[in-house]
Image (cartoon, helix red, strand yellow):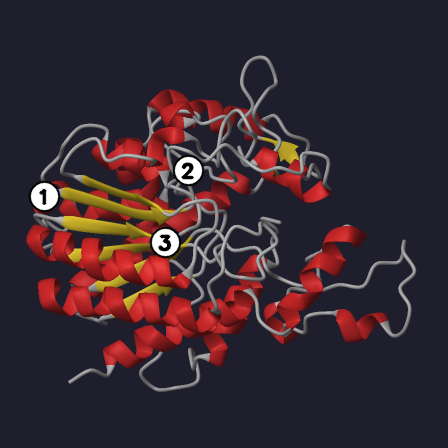
Amino acid sequence: FESPVRTPAAIQGARLAGAGLKPNMLLITKVEDSYMSLAEDDIIPKAHKVSYIKRLKSKIAALPVDAKGVPLTDDSEGEGGDDTMGSRGSYTAATVGVAAALKATDMVVGGQCTNVFCATRPPGHHAGRELRPMKAISNGFCLLNAAACAAIFATTPQSEGGLGLKRVCVIDFDVHHGNGTQDILCSTYDPRYLYVSLHAGGAHINGFDDEDSEEEEFRKRLGGSTTEGIYPGRCGDSSPHDGVLNIPLGKKVTASDVGTALISQVSPRVEEFSPDLIILSAGFDAHKNDPLGMGGLSALDFGNVTEVACQMAFRSCSGRILSVLEGGYGVPCCRPRDDIFLPGNPDDQLLELGDDLPDGMDDPVPLTFRQKLSKCHAEGFLHCVKEHVTAFAKCSNRK
């Protein structure tokens, strides 16, 4: 599900919110070499151990040029890599994601804009200092942690090439706990950072009942087995110190639970922390039609979550907020397949992404998942991004 078409779908969602069409909503599609160098040489080594970076680079460099879908984060015994696949371009793609987050941080802190949404992939909040942080069984699609890198860049002293902020808050509303972000920023208490996560899980959650279904097999790849609980495990069930606020919301995340948590727990803690910048790890896999089936939120609910976060930013840091795309897999099939027969007109069941879908980008969705994703035509990942960006735009126009 963490497929390349997520990027054009996210861009299309941003366009539907007005990005690139309205004068005050820029759509930026490139990152300068200076931010790539900053990411590669300075910031990524502060977030991830050198041993992890070398391991990842070596693994990718050894791949054949035309290799696709190869496990990148398996251990020495070949275990734990099935959910984090890639190709020769994967490390570069992840680095571009970090560089985009650094540019966004620079723009927001520098006053060029109030907020930015980074439509990048692969996601990053499960990538920690080392492979499989906090005893997770895999890396959960993630290679480099863009949100954590942005926080590090923001708080690095200006004399060392950073932005010199004192405090940054990361709010993670992906359906999974961001174990990698917590590992990088808050493995021990650091007064510069507050990490907040609202996610599926809890001390008494032990996985799913139907272990024979195809969906359950996919969930197991994300750690959702009966012995491990919901991925990434128990690390998000409690808050180890004042720099972390973990809010597990049970087996299925609902809008009412998220809203209650935001108002009663998150807002007071963020206001007390008084950050200079808020970074959102924006995962949309708690949507009601997401194939993971772990959430009940609508696209409008994600817009409301974004507005509440913006309100926190206005109270604490003059509205300065940015978001980095994490999960969210409700993207219907974008390409026809020539190896299956579908009744009727197959083109009627394809998601139309126009020029945002590159000519050479494939979308080989298995038939069973293709059918499961069909309901996302009515509302899915693209619509969540639209509401998220719409909320940002509304907050940017706040007087």
Q: CA distance from mark 1 to mark 3?
A: 28 Å
What's the amino acid at mark 3? Phe
Pointer 2 with pointer 3, Cβ within 8 A = no
Q: Taking the image as drawn, is residue 220 in sight?
A: yes
Q: How many marks?
A: 3
Q: Quadrant of the C terminus?
A: bottom left
Q: Determine the secondary structure under disc 3.
A: loop
Q: Earlier in the sequence, mark 2 or mark 3?
A: 2
Instruction: Tell me the quarter of the picture where residue 329 sits.
Output: bottom right
Q: Earlier in the sequence, mark 1 or mark 3?
A: 1
Does residue 20 sit above or below 209 in this rendering?
below
Does residue 137 sit above or below 258 in this rendering?
above
Pointer 1 with pointer 2, Cβ within 8 A = no
Circle 2 residue: 126
Front-lying residue, 19 or 126 = 126
Q: Nearer the viewer, mark 2 or mark 3?
A: 3
Badge number at residue 157: 1
Residue depicted at 31% across the width and 47% down the height? 197
What's the amino acid at mark 1? Pro
Q: Determine the secondary structure under disc 2.
A: loop
Q: Determine the secondary structure under disc 1.
A: loop
- In this rendering, would 155 be left or right of 295? left
Q: CA distance from mark 2 to mark 3?
A: 13 Å
Image coordinates of residue 222 in percent, x first then y, are 54, 36
Pointer 1 with pointer 3, Cβ within 8 A = no
Does residue 132 sit above or below 197 in this rendering?
above
Residue depicted at 49% across the width and 39% down the height? 91
Q: CA distance from mark 1 to mark 2?
A: 26 Å
Q: Earlier in the sequence, mark 1 or mark 2?
A: 2
Identity of the residue furthest to the top in this view: 77
Q: Taking the image as drawn, is residue 38 in sight?
A: no
Badge number at residue 173: 3
